[in-house]
C-alpha cells in the first residue's frame, strides 16, 4: 500500500533528495527555495550533511567538491542566486562530476519576491547541462532521484528548476522508497579533468558538447517528456513545466482536441518535437518566461524541412513576462486557432479595495534606524540599499536603490567617486553583509570612499524564513559554532569608524549617525536588535504601550512614523495603539507630550 502525504512543493523536493540518497546538501536561503534545506536541517535523524552557506557561490563549490569526490550532492538557491554561482557553474560544465550533482534554482515568474524574473533554462542551455522542469510537486519529488541517476550516468551536473507555484504549492504526494545505497566517496586525482587551465579546458569543450547531445538522446525517451498524437487533428500544442498543467486545462475548457507534447526535461527532445511537427499544420508553444522551447522548435522545423506554422511568444499570443494561468492559455489557444472566445465569469466588486503596500513589521528595529538615518542625513541624503526586509525602508524614504545582494556598499562607492556632493548612507543586513557585503566594504575602505555603511543586524536571515547566519553562533542543524563578530570583521577590513547602537534608543543612535556622517572616510554603523518575529517565536515578551487620550494632541507624529501598531482614531482625533504592539517603545520617545506610556501589569 502506497503512502501519501499532503506536502509543500519544497518539502516534496526535500523528500526526493532523501529518496535519491543525497549525501551533501548546501545552499543559501532565497524565496521560493528556502524550505528545501529548512526541511532537511530540521530532521532529527540524518545520514547526510546539510549546511546554510554564506552565499550561493560558496554553496555551489561545496556541493561541487563533494560531487567530484564521488558523492551525491545538491545545491539550492533562487534564480538570482544562480547569477552569484554562475562563475563555478560554467566551468563545472567542463569538469563534470564523479558522483552526481543537482543544482536547484527556483524561478519566480511575476517577481513575487524577487528583483527580476529571469529564466534558469537559459543558464542550462548556456552551461550545456540537462535541466528538469517539474509541473507538479509529485513530479518534483520523483524527478530528483532520476536527476541523480542521469547526472551520475553522464558525469555531468543537472539543473533542477522549480518555480514559485511548484515550490510553494501543496498537493498530495505519493512517497517512494528511500535508497539505502550510497556511493563510496574517494577523491581521485585527475589533473587533466579537475584542473581547468586553458590546455585542459580546450580538450574538455568538445567532450562536453558530445555529452550534451547524448543526454538529449537519453531524454527523448524520458517519462518527463510525453507525446500524445491525435488522429484526425492538424492542430498541436507544445508546453513545458507548470505551464503544461494550465495548457491542458485550457484545452479542455476550449473543447480543443489536439496533439499535445509536454516537455519537462531538457535538452528539448528532438524526435518527439519532429513527430508532432510532422503530424500538425499549426503548432502553439505555451511556456512561461523565455521562448526556450519555442526557439528550439522553430530551429528543428527548419533543420528537418518541416513546413508548419509555429505560434507563441513571437506573435504575441503568449506573454514573455509574468506567470501564466488557465485564462491566459485559453486566450492564446482561441487566438491561435481561431476558436470562439470562451466566456469567463467576471468578478464584480461593489467596493474598491484599499492599497496595501508591504511594510516593515510592527516594532521592527529597521524602521527606527531608517527614521534616525533620514533625520541625520536629511532629505537630500542618498540612500542605496540592499536585498532584505530593510528594502521596505522605501516606505520611510530611506531607500533610493536596490540592485542585488551586496550592491548597496559598492553602488555607494560609485556614487561618491562620481563626484556626488550630498552625503551617502547605505543600508545592508547582517546576512547580506556576510554574503557579499564584506568585499564591498573592503573596496570602499581601500579606495577611500567617504560614505556611511549601515549594517542592520537583526540576528537572523529574516526575509527568507529566519535561517541562521554566521553571526548567530549556530549552524543550519542547530549546532553551536563560532559567532562571527561583524564589528571585528569591519575593523579587520580597515574601517576606522565602527560603532554599534541599539536603534530603539533614538537619542544614542542619532549621536552615532551624526559622528559617522562627519567622519572623513568609510564609516560603519551597526544597528543591532533581534528580529521581533524571532523574539516572539522564542517566547520573549516585551512591555506594551498605550496612548493617554487626555495628553494626546492629535499631532500624528507617532502615526507618521509608520508602525502598523499605531493608528489614528478619526472620531476622537487621537492616536491609539492596537494589539500588534511589540513593545519597542520608539513611539513613546517620539511623543513630545508624554502621551504614550508603558502599560503597567
Image: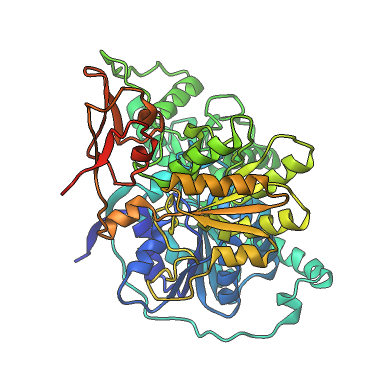
Q: Nearer the viewer, residue 307 or 374?
A: 374
Residue 345 visible in the snapshot? yes
Q: Nearer the viewer, residue 23 or 402?
A: 402
Residue reaching furthest top? 350
The image quarter containing residue 443 is: bottom right
Tell me where residue 349 appears, x and y as whole percent.
27, 16
Q: Is residue 335 left or right of residue 451?
A: left
* Type of colouring: rainbow
Tell me where residue 414 appears, x and y as whole percent.
74, 43
Q: Tell me if residue 546 comes above or below residue 161 in the rendering.
A: above
Q: Report the number of discs.
A: 0
Tell me where residue 374 appears, x and y as whole percent.
54, 36
Q: Nearer the viewer, residue 332 or 76?
A: 76
Residue reaching furthest right? 199
Residue 238 visible in the snapshot? no
The residue at the point 34 percent across, 46 percent down is: 584
Amino acid at each position: 500500500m502506497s503512502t501519501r502525504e499532503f506536502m509543500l512543493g519544497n518539502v516534496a523536493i526535500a523528500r526526493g533528495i532523501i529518496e535519491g540518497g543525497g549525501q551533501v546538501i548546501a545552499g543559501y536561503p532565497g524565496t521560493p527555495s528556502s524550505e528545501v534545506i529548512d526541511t532537511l536541517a530540521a530532521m532529527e535523524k540524518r545520514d547526510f550533511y546539510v549546511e546554510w552557506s554564506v552565499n550561493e557561490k560558496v554553496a555551489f563549490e561545496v556541493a561541487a567538491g563533494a560531487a567530484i569526490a564521488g558523492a551525491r550532492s545538491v545545491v539550492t538557491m533562487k534564480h538570482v542566486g544562480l547569477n552569484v554561482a554562475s562563475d563555478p557553474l560554467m566551468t563545472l560544465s567542463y569538469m563534470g562530476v564523479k558522483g552526481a550533482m543537482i543544482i536547484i534554482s527556483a524561478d519566480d515568474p511575476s517577481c513575487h519576491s524577487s528583483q527580476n524574473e529571469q529564466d534558469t533554462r537559459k543558464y542550462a542551455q548556456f552551461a550545456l547541462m540537462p535541466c528538469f522542469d517539474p509541473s507538479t510537486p509529485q513530479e518534483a519529488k520523483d524527478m530528483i532521484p532520476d536527476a541523480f541517476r542521469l547526472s551520475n550516468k553522464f558525469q555531468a551536473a543537472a539543473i533542477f528548476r522549480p518555480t514559485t507555484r511548484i515550490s510553494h504549492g501543496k498537493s498530495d504526494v505519493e512517497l517512494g522508497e528511500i535508497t539505502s545505497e550510497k556511493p563510496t566517496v574517494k577523491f581521485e586525482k585527475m589533473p587533466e579533468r579537475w584542473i581547468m587551465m586553458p590546455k585542459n579546458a580546450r580538450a574538455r569543450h568538445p567532450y562536453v558538447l558530445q555529452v550534451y547531445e547524448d543526454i538529449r538522446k537519453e531524454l527523448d525517451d524520458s517519462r518527463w517528456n510525453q507525446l500524445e498524437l491525435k488522429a484526425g487533428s492538424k492542430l498541436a500544442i507544445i508546453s513545458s513545466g507548470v505551464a503544461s498543467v494550465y495548457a491542458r486545462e485550457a484545452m479542455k475548457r476550449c473543447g480543443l482536441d489536439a496533439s499535445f507534447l509536454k516537455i519537462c526535461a531538457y535538452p528539448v527532445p528532438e524526435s518527439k518535437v519532429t513527430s508532432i511537427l510532422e503530424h500538425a499544420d499549426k503548432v502553439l508553444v505555451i511556456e512561461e518566461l523565455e521562448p526556450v522551447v519555442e526557439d528550439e522548435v522553430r530551429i528543428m522545423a527548419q533543420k528537418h524541412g518541416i513546413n508548419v506554422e509555429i505560434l507563441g511568444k513571437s506573435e504575441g499570443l503568449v506573454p514573455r513576462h509574468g506567470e501564466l494561468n488557465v485564462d491566459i492559455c485559453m486566450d492564446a489557444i482561441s487566438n491561435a486557432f481561431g476558436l470562439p472566445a470562451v466566456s469567463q465569469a467576471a468578478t464584480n466588486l461593489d467596493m474598491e479595495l484599499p492599497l496595501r503596500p508591504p511594510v516593515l513589521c510592527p516594532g521592527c528595529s529597521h524602521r527606527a534606524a531608517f527614521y534616525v538615518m533620514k533625520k541625520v542625513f536629511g532629505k537630500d541624503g542618498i540612500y542605496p540599499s540592499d536585498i532584505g526586509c530593510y528594502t521596505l525602508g522605501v516606505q520611510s524614504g530611506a531607500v533610493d536603490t536596490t540592485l542585488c545582494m551586496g550592491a548597496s556598499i559598492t553602488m555607494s562607492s560609485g556614487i561618491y567617486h562620481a563626484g556626488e556632493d550630498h552625503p551617502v548612507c547605505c543600508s545592508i543586513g547582517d546576512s547580506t553583509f556576510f554574503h557579499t557585503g564584506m568585499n564591498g566594504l573592503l573596496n570602499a575602505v581601500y579606495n577611500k570612499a567617504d560614505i556611511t555603511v549601515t549594517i542592520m543586524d537583526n540576528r537572523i536571515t529574516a526575509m527568507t524564513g529566519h535561517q541562521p547566519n554566521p553571526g548567530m553562533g549556530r549552524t543550519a542543524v542547530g549546532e553551536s559554532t563560532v559567532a562571527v563578530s561583524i564589528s571585528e570583521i569591519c575593523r579587520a577590513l580597515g574601517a576606522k569608524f565602527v560603532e554599534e547602537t541599539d536603534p530603539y534608543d533614538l537619542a544614542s543612535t542619532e549621536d552615532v549617525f551624526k559622528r559617522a556622517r562627519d567622519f572623513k572616510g568609510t564609516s560603519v554603523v551597526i544597528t543591532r536588535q533581534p528580529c521581533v518575529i524571532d523574539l516572539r517565536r522564542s517566547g520573549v515578551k516585551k512591555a506594551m504601550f498605550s496612548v493617554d487620550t487626555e495628553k494626546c494632541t492629535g499631532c500624528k507624529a507617532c502615526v507618521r512614523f509608520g508602525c502598523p501598531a499605531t493608528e489614528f482614531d478619526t472620531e476622537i482625533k487621537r492616536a491609539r495603539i492596537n494589539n500588534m504592539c511589540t513593545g519597542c517603545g520608539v513611539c513613546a520617545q517620539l511623543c513630545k507630550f508624554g502621551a504614550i506610556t508603558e502599560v503597567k501589569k
